[in-house]
Image (spheres, helix red, strand yellow):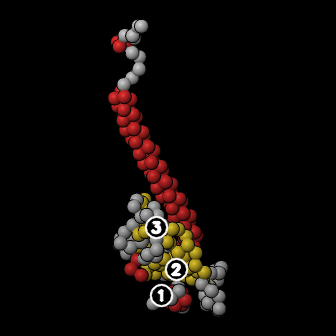
Amino acid sequence: MNRPDPRDDRGVTLTEVLVCLGIMSVVMVVFTGGIIAMRRTLARTEQISWTQQEVARAFDRVDAVLRFASAVEVGNGGAAITFVLPERATEPECFRLVLGTDRRLRQSAAPLPLDGAAVRSTVLASNVTASNATAFQYPSGGDAARLNIAITATTSDNTTGRRLDQTFELPNQGSDSGGRLDQCKSIMGVS
């Protein structure tokens, strides 16, 4: 009987198989970790992008009415503004914009005088925080004809964000007569 020559054995040893499996496991763990990290980064970037688009739309809506405001007042420690449109403006005439602790930018609107109508409140943007100590402020130098809004668009877990600033022109600021701003503040529950 002929025995095969041990030098001609074409198989692999158990040790070689285990080494290959170990190397393959390390490669798969690194690859899977990279895919998971990319997915998280993509989700975070998409969420900030959506929030940034919401803030851009909110700025457009605010600009559409704020430019006609006859009186604007920053209040609540810079976390809110109250403003009124001139008389004979289309309804509503009284507005309040608040950046709440719930990370939402809300706009409330009501007619002047209230006459039994309800104050309408709309969320303009979610997942936003103040970029500075105050979200709403007049630019340095006390120029009340302009208002700066500084907001940071964040993720839902508030870990990362993108700062968004816009300065709004207030050409009619100071033309309010008859205490309409005080009426508006009373309607909105502002002291």
Instruction: Measuring from the top left, give residue 97's x and y in whole percent.
Output: 51, 76
- What residue is shown with label 3? 128
> CB under 8 Å between callouts 2 and 1?
yes
Given residues 171 and 73, the one toward you in this image is 73
Query: Which residue is the site of mark 1?
Result: 190
Q: Is residue 116 left or right of residue 3?
A: right
Check disc 2 and report its element: helix, strand or loop: strand
Tell me if I can see residue 35 in this picture: yes
Q: Position of residue 32 (x, y in %)?
A: 44, 43
User: Of the numbered discs in the image, which one, if any, rests on residue 96?
Assistant: 2
For the residues carrying marks 1 and 3, which lies nearer the camera in this image? Answer: 3
Judge whether residue 145 can be spotted in this image. Answer: no
Amino acid type of the residue that numbered disc 2 sits on in the rendered structure = Arg
- Mark 3 or mark 1, which is nearer the start of the sequence? 3
For marks 3 and 2, give the CA distance.
17 Å
Report the amino acid beneath label 1.
Val
- Residue displayed at 37% across by 38% down: 26
Where, by quadrant of the figure, is residue 19 drawn? top left
Residue closest to the eye, 93 or 53 = 53
Between the C-alphas of marks 2 and 1, the distance is 9 Å
